[in-house]
């Protein structure tokens, strides 16, 4: 009930984005910090069920874009819609999940308590909550560490807990800001299988990463530089257009303006 | 506002305290430590208080009543009796001895006048209130700048004199000592400050926990994370308020039981009402900590706020001395400190046995304080988005 009425409010002239297969739409989205332009009139469209990779050097505006989409930063100008609702989300806020770039977990709680906190915020029933907790602990390979205090985990393990927290309620749209930093290669592969799974179930996943081997696994890659999207497309397409054989070179080519 | 989400936040806050054994231990031990330190410092036996004894008593044929009283005073360790040194062996005016009190060398001068013994002997056959009808049968010149010491001296002299009168002269009549007693005996002083320490401890802990937790939530990004969930700002604030209110309650229980068991403090009124007052104070201070945490950018800055809030409360809220002792200039400040009302309320309930019918003004102030802080912190959090 609540969701529907909010959808109507969020709907725009161009129609309800949630019904036309678009999960995220930004229009001239802009964020300035004093005289620094972090995100520069960004126009972005991400379809439902897409695994979208955002790449770009440090400070190119990836985190700022995500923070605006999840409602933590107010855009300086421009608009955006997530699941058809204009940001900041209200009605559909339970349908998004966000893993911040910094390791935002409660280190003075155990791993399970962290998961349970996020589960109970979404009013998950006890049974569902425990089931989900088990699932996610095994996904991040921490099944035997559920009762450890988060402060006693290694850095990579903490990142894994943080990822699991964002996924507790199995949201429709997941924003993952560098989810694989500090995670060992084997487990990273495991994560990507899981992301593929999510996609197969129609979930939309927005991931930022500095690993090109990960970016290649995305459906669509958006290349950002100085707050602007300099190129976007499937990895194959991007390499073809820039006549390169990997995304790193492709990025260099696009940022020098060589391609297109 | 969904109750389930409020409890989720409250539970997580309490759980993290549970895991942090040192902090949890501190929460229980700090009030114990405070009450013990203050209890023994202010309420314990005072010893070796320097006083001069001037014995002008000429005695009677039967001997000297003052001599046996001085012996008795000296046999106990509360007072250290000093003999005035008379130059040339000549008894000078009492006033020159009192100079020792004026310049801080002694706390008091006890004067037995010339006719002390004869007064006592007349009392043996006299009416029961004979001694108490004589003005100035015994003089004490006292430095009352420290009410505890002053009252200890008077109590000591009074009880000693009466004991000697009773055992040696069989006189039960009270003696009139020309001195107004500001505070009662030791035990009564404990009764006076136990409610104060309780309020102070609850306030310190809720304020410190709140400001530190929130600065931490902000700096680690967990607060951001909570704000991207369906949790509303009000629910976050309410969850914390419940959790820290409970912490304040547990603390007060510890203090109350210590005060009762160790220091025989009496609670005349309702203990539940006392706890309600402390809970309101805790909730309000949680909100205050929350508000200030938005100004502090890191834990270090947060720590700097603590003395700013705590010092005036410790000094001006009537915790250790009555509000009447606060200088006029600072009295308006006292009226702005919520702890003032909590202490006053607890004191009235515990000592005077007042109920809600009498302490409603204090309770009302605290309810308003708590409500205002909660609303402001919710608003402050919302403005961030
Ligand atoms: N709160 C802030 N105040 C001022 N400037 C900010 C703030 N947050 C980000 N910036 C600036 O905005 C720009 C974009 O930052 P952002 O965090 O979005 O980059 P990013 O693409 O996520 O980089 P990284 O790969 O290092 O995570 C940077 O120049 C950064 O310094
Ligand atoms: Mg970033």
Image (cartoon, rainbow, N blue to C red):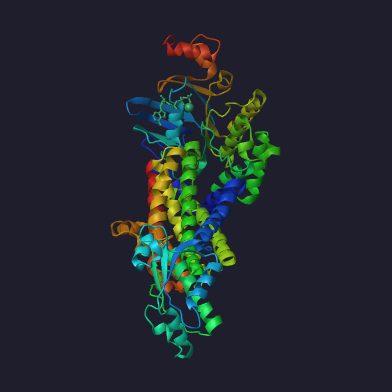
Looking at the image, the residue that sits furthest to the front is: B88
Q: Residue at x 50, y 74 (%)?
A: B67
Picture coordinates of residue A69 (x, y %)?
44, 34
Position of residue A179 relative to residue B352, above or below, is above
Looking at the image, the residue that sits furthest to the left is: B329
Image quarter hosting the C terminus of chain A: top left
> B171 or B208: which is nearer to us?
B171
Q: Please indicate, yes or no, whether residue B279 appears anywhere in the rendered image.
A: no
Say left or right for A208 vs B344. right
Q: Please indicate, yes or no, whether residue A68 appears anywhere in the rendered image.
A: yes
Position of residue B213 relative to residue A196, above or below, is below
Picture coordinates of residue B9 (x, y %)?
53, 49
> B214 or A89: which is nearer to us?
B214
Figure disc tally = 0
> B113 or B153: which is nearer to us?
B113
Within the image, what quadrant is residue A38 found in?
top left
Picture coordinates of residue B109 (x, y %)?
41, 66
Picture coordinates of residue B206 (x, y %)?
48, 52
Position of residue B282 relative to residue B221, above or below, is below
> A109 or B66: which is nearer to us?
B66
Q: Residue at x 48, y 44 (%)?
A: B212
């Amino acid at each position: 009930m609540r969701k529907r009425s909010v959808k109507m409010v969020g709907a725009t002239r161009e129609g309800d984005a949630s019904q036309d297969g678009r999960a995220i739409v930004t229009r001239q989205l802009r964020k300035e910090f004093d005289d620094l332009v972090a995100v520069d009139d960004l126009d972005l469209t991400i379809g439902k069920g897409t695994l979208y990779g955002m790449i770009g050097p440090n400070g190119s505006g990836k985190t700022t874009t995500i923070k605006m989409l999840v409602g933590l930063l107010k855009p300086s100008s421009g608009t955006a819609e997530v699941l058809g609702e204009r940001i900041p989300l209200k009605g559909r806020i339970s349908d998004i999940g966000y893993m911040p770039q910094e390791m935002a977990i409660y280190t003075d709680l155990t791993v399970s308590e962290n998961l349970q906190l996020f589960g109970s915020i979404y009013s998950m029933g006890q049974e569902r909550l425990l089931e989900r907790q088990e699932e996610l602990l095994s996904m991040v390979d921490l099944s035997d560490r559920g009762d450890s205090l988060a402060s006693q985990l290694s850095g990579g393990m903490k990142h894994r807990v943080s990822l699991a927290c964002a996924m507790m309620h199995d949201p429709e749209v997941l924003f993952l800001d560098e989810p694989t930093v500090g995670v060992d290669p084997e487990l990273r592969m495991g994560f990507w299988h899981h992301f593929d799974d999510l996609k197969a179930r129609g979930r939309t996943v927005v991931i930022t990463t500095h690993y090109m081997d990960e970016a290649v696994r995305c459906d669509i890659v958006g290349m950002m530089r100085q707050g602007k999207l300099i190129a976007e497309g499937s990895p194959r397409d991007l390499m073809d257009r820039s006549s390169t054989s990997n995304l790193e070179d492709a990025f260099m080519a696009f940022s020098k303006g060589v391609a297109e | 506002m969904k109750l389930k989400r409020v409890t989720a936040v409250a539970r997580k806050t309490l759980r993290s305290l549970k895991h942090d054994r040192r902090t949890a231990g501190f929460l229980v031990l700090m009030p114990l430590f405070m009450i013990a330190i203050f209890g023994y410092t202010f309420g314990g036996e005072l010893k070796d208080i320097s006083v001069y004894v001037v014995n002008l008593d000429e005695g009677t044929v039967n001997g000297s009543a003052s001599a046996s009283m001085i012996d008795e005073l000296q046999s106990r360790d509360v007072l250290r009796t000093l003999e005035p040194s008379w130059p040339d062996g000549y008894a000078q005016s009492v006033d020159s001895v009192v100079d020792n009190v004026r310049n801080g060398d002694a706390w008091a001068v006890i004067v037995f006048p010339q006719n002390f013994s004869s007064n006592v002997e007349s009392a043996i056959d006299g009416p029961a209130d004979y001694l108490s009808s004589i003005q100035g049968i015994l003089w004490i010149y006292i430095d009352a700048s420290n009410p505890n010491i002053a009252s200890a001296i008077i109590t000591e002299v009074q009880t000693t004199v009466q004991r000697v009168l009773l055992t040696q002269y069989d006189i039960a009549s009270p003696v009139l000592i020309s001195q107004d007693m500001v505070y009662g005996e030791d035990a009564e002083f404990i009764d006076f400050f136990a409610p104060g320490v309780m309020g102070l401890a609850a306030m310190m802990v809720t304020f410190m926990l709140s400001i530190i937790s929130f600065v931490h939530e902000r700096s680690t990004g967990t607060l951001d994370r909570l704000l991207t969930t369906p949790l509303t700002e009000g629910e976050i604030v309410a969850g914390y308020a419940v959790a820290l209110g409970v912490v304040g309650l547990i603390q007060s229980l510890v203090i109350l039981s210590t005060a009762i068991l160790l220091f025989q403090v009496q609670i005349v009124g309702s203990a539940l009402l006392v706890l309600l007052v402390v809970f309101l104070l805790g909730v309000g201070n949680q909100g205050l900590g929350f508000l200030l945490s938005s100004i502090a950018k890191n834990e270090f800055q947060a720590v700097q706020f603590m003395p700013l809030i705590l010092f005036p409360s410790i000094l001006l809220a009537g915790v250790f001395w009555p509000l009447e002792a606060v200088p006029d200039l600072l009295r308006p400040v006292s009226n702005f400190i919520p702890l003032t009302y909590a202490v006053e309320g607890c004191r009235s309930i515990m000592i005077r046995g007042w109920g809600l019918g009498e302490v409603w003004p204090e309770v009302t102030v605290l309810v308003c304080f708590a409500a205002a802080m909660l609303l402001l912190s919710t608003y402050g959090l919302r403005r961030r988005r």
